[in-house]
Every structure is written in C-alpha cells, then in structure tokens.
Image (cartoon, helix red, strand yellow):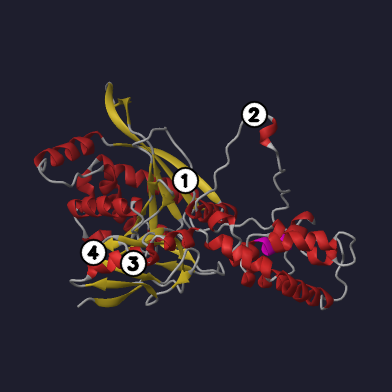
Amino acid sequence: MSQTKDIPVPDVGDFDEVEIIEVLVSPGDTIEAEDSLITLESDKASMEIPAPEGGTVKEVKVEVGQKVKEGDTILTLEAGEQGASGGDEADSDGGDAEPAAEESADEKTSEKADDEAPGANKEEAASKDTAPAGEEPTEPPKPAGRERGSPTAHIEQEKHLKAHASPGVRRFARELGADLTQVTGSGRKGRVLKEDVKAHVKQAMEAPAAAAGGGLGVPPMPEIDFSEFGEIETKPLTKINKLTGQNLHRNWVTVPHVTQFDKADITDLEAFRKELNAENRDSSVKITLVSFLIKAMVSALREFPRFNSSLDPAGEKLIFKKYFHVGVAVDTPDGLVVPVLRDVDRKSLNDLARELMDISQAARDKKLSPKQMKGGCISISSLGGVGGTAFTPIVNAPEVAILGVSKASTEPVWNGEEFVPRLMLPLSLSYDHRVIDGADAARFTTYVGRLLSDTRRMLL
C-alpha cells in the first residue's frame, strides 16, 4: 500500500515569510532524497529546499511568487511500493497538463483580473470619490487624482486594469493611489507584486523632498533610449543583485567611508602554505590565504576592540562584541553574497579551510540559510584570484570595517643592505569614520601586515 505524506517548509531562519522564486517539481515526478523541490529567496540569498525522502509527487501545494514560512506544506509525496505506478496514474490523469497550467498561471491571473474589470472600475470610482480633500491633480504620487475629471480618465483606467498584477495587488494599489502602469514588476514575467507597489509609492513620496533640496538633493538619472545608438539587449537583475545594490547604496550614503591602503610581506607565509598543502596532498581540503587572513583578523580584533563593535541605531552608543565571527565575500553566478564563519577563534587553519570550501560551495548552489548570512564582526573581500592592485570595499554595516585584499606580486624591497624580491600583498581597509580614526586604521593594517609577515605572531 502506498502512503502519502505532506512535506513541509523546514527552518528558514528568523524570517517570517520567504518568497518562492522557483518550483522545481510537478505532480507525477519521481524524486529522490535531497532532490531540490523549490527555491526560496530571502533579502540576502537564495536557497533550494531539498526533499527529505524519495517518492512520487502527488500534489504541489505552492506556486511561484507565494510567500511561505516554516511548517507550510510544499507538496504531498506518495511513497511505498506503489509509488511508481502512482506516478504513471498521474501522467495518464492529466499530469502533463499540470506544468502547462503552472506556466500559464500568471496569464490566467491577468485574464481573471480583466474579467473582474467592471467590479474593479466601481471600486476604483469609489476610491476616487473618497480621495482626501485638497488633492492636487498634478501631485506626482497621485495618478488617480490626475485621472479624476480628465477626458482621458477611461484610457488611464484601462491601462491600469491591463497591468500584469493580481486582483489583490490592484486593490492594494488603488488604496495607495498608485498607478500600476508606472510600476515595474519584479515577479515572474514582469508581474507586479505588493513589494513593487510599496517601493513605487515610497520613491514617489521621497521625490518631492529631493526636488526641494531634501535628502541628497540629487536629481534622478535621465531616461535614455540606448537603442538610438545601436543594438542593445536588456536583461533583468536577479533579486540578489537588486537587494545587494540597495544595501550597498544604503551603506555608502549613510556610512562615512575612508579607506586605508597598505602592503604585507607574505613571502614566508606563502612558502609555509604551500608546504602544508604538499604535506596533505591527499586531502580534499586545500589551505588558502583567506584562512590565514581570518586568523589574523582574530588577533587584530583582540588588539583593536573598536573594530569589533557596532553603532546602535541611534548612533549614540558603541556595542562591543565578545565573539569573533568573520564574513567572507563569495562571488556567485547570481551575485555577491557574504556568508559568515562563526567562532573563528576556536578553529584551526584546517577547520577554517574546510568550512570556507563548504560554505563557498553552498553559496554557489543556493543552499545558504539566512542564519549563515548574519552576525559578522568584520568582513573580508579577496580579489587576489582575479587581479588588481587596490580597491575601496564598501563597509558591510552594521560592521564598522571591511578588509579588501588584491593580487599579491613580487616586488624589490630594501632590507637595509640591498633590494631583495619579496611577495607583497596589497591591503585595502575601509572603515566607518564615525567609529574609527585614521590613525587607528593605519595601526590596524600595520598590525595585520606584521601578523602575515610572521605567522608565529598569531599564536601570541
């Protein structure tokens, strides 16, 4: 006898809800344990949810764009001796039609919205009748006010109804007075989500302040039709690209950045690193320079505790941390993510090398959990494998500093008697000038340089 079992969403960290961006299985599919079922995307990373066991998918209970939380049912799984035949029945009973229905879910939603157009028109008219008094027809965030009494009101309303959005989102947009034709959708096939409406309204509310000299007072970028100059191709940013950009922009405009540049002599360290890897050539784990950098961060944070702190939201208190968690920037096909290695002060070089390899692979496979992205004390961004001589990394607030590392190169160094070839590593330390003074930053990079030049100092 076959048995059915509901497969729930596992622990997704301390997020209330996480959006589904991909559904990777369909009714009738035969899956094995650890096969990916859905892809979730939080504010900071994407993660694939694996199957806890094998069987035949009987019913998928989620869809793209839906937000889920821990415990919500993903699908019903049929296991047991009849699992294979159950999959055949699903195919013969219309299993082939299910994926097609999923692919056209957005179109059906749009058609349904069009069918509801008469009711929507009444609701919209009622919303307009109850609009706040004194609303000016030309007020930027109130396109509904501009439509009222306009000869082209019915045309604008028709555009509003044809916007790719669900009835719930349309109702939400009407309540806020947002024009859906002006909202860029981030959902599947450009579908407008509630978050898009919120972002649009927020931008519209901030626009008058900027125009009046408030905020940064920076005019918006002009809209340019680049196709006038030649052939173009437009590709949407991934959600990680968008959120990373938002976070970096926020950090850049709110944190007063200064970058301190220095160099570290890693000639002996590199020789030692190669020796360790040669001794353990049969091991699947290779010790990289980043493992030594993490160890150096522990010693440096102990020596300069102000670097292991964060400003409170009000900017009036400094919170000193007694733990040592280090974030490491990882380049993935979907964008930059910064997983955090915890309690690095308690781990050996081999432990750190192994964890770095595992967490980097998890980042590329979209298997990082939200918890693995939080709690860092300081971050490291290494571009040594790519190239460059220096750069200015952006502080990953609420951290107060980030260490950038560029490609090491052999340079002539004067030893007091002659020039000798030494392998020099460029360091770029960006820091929050509200917390750290320039002199302390110079002392910090000098200290890190001494640690990397003589690894014995890390034992002190």
* Disc number placed over residue 90 in the picture, else none: 3
Q: CA distance from mark 2 to mark 3?
A: 50 Å
User: Could you tell me which quadrant the C terminus lies in?
Assistant: bottom left
N-term mark: 2 or 3? 3
Membership of 144 in magenta stretch? no
| Mark 2 or 4, closer to the camera | 4
Q: Which residue is mark 2?
A: 230
| Mark 4 or 1, closer to the camera | 4
Asked whether, in this view, residue 207 is left or right of residue 151, the answer is: left
* Disc number placed over residue 393 in the picture, else none: 1
N-term mark: 4 or 3? 4
Q: CA distance from mark 4 to mark 1?
A: 41 Å
Residue nearer the viewer, 42 or 260: 42
Asked whether, in this view, residue 158 is left or right of residue 393, the answer is: right
Secondary element at image label 1: loop
Q: CA distance from mark 3 to mark 1?
A: 53 Å
Give residue 7's position: percent from left, percent from top. Answer: 32, 73
* Disc number placed over residue 33 in the picture, else none: 4
Asked whether, in this view, residue 242 is left or right of residue 405, the answer is: right
Q: Are marks 3 and 1 in contact (CB under 8 Å)?
A: no
Q: CA distance from mark 4 to mark 3?
A: 20 Å
N-term mark: 2 or 4? 4
Give residue 57's position: percent from left, percent from top. Answer: 32, 67
Range drawn in magenta: 200-205
Question: Which amino acid, mark 3?
Answer: Ala
One can see residue 31 in this view: yes
Residue nearer the viewer, 175 or 209: 175
Q: Which quadrant of the structure image shows residue 229? A: top right
